Amino acid sequence: MPPLQAYLLYLLTAMALLFLFTLIYLKLTPYDELKLLRAGETAPLLSLGGAELGVTLALASSIMHNDSYPLFLLWAGIAMLIQLLLYVALTRLVPDLKRAIADNNTGMAGLLGMASLAVGILNAACLY
């Protein structure tokens, strides 16, 4: 495949996967991040932003370490699943986390965002 075509394929696929991840994440959470963001709340920015950065690192790592498009897709999907499972696990371990985000508790949102980023870094490091 010519380099420009490969570049566009991987870039557009990664952007579509990030968009898909974001849609799933927004459906998974019980609060309306977009409404809260429009109202100027910072807590959803920290939590959603951390999750998006975490999964973006894993997507980038999958692109860099897989020499075939199907492997890129497989590992990208696994990395996205891990990020979503992290949210589910953290909201079980910290029961008031869901409510804290809706209440604009930036400390709790930062905890979720940084955990998502940390797991994204580990995800990225493990992909090869």
Image: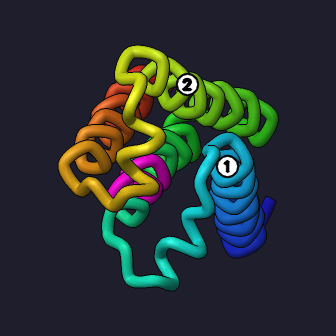
Rendered location of residue 101, percent (x, y): 40, 51
- Write down the residue under mark 2: 88
Rendered location of residue 108, percent (x, y): 26, 43
Along the line of sight, the residue nearer the viewer: 31 or 55: 31
Q: Quadrant of residue 11?
A: bottom right
Which range is magenta? 46-53
Is 74 placed left or right of 116 in the picture?
A: right
Q: How many neighbours does mark 1 have within 10 angstroms: few (below 14), some (14-19), or many (20 or more)?
A: many
At a point 59% along the width and 32% down the height, the residue shown is 84
Along the line of sight, the residue nearer the viewer: 77 or 30: 30
Instruction: Confirm whether the magenta stretch covers residue 48.
Output: yes
Rendered location of residue 77, percent (x, y): 70, 33
Q: How is the image coloured?
A: rainbow
Q: Quadrant of residue 80?
A: top right
The dominant secondary structure in magenta is helix
Q: Quadrant of residue 43?
A: bottom left
Mark 2 vs mark 1, CA separation in Å: 14 Å
Task: Say whether residue 14 is visible.
Answer: no
Along the line of sight, the residue nearer the viewer: 76 or 2: 76
At a point 46% along the width and 26% down the height, the residue shown is 91
- Write down the residue under mark 1: 21
Mark drawn on residue 66: none
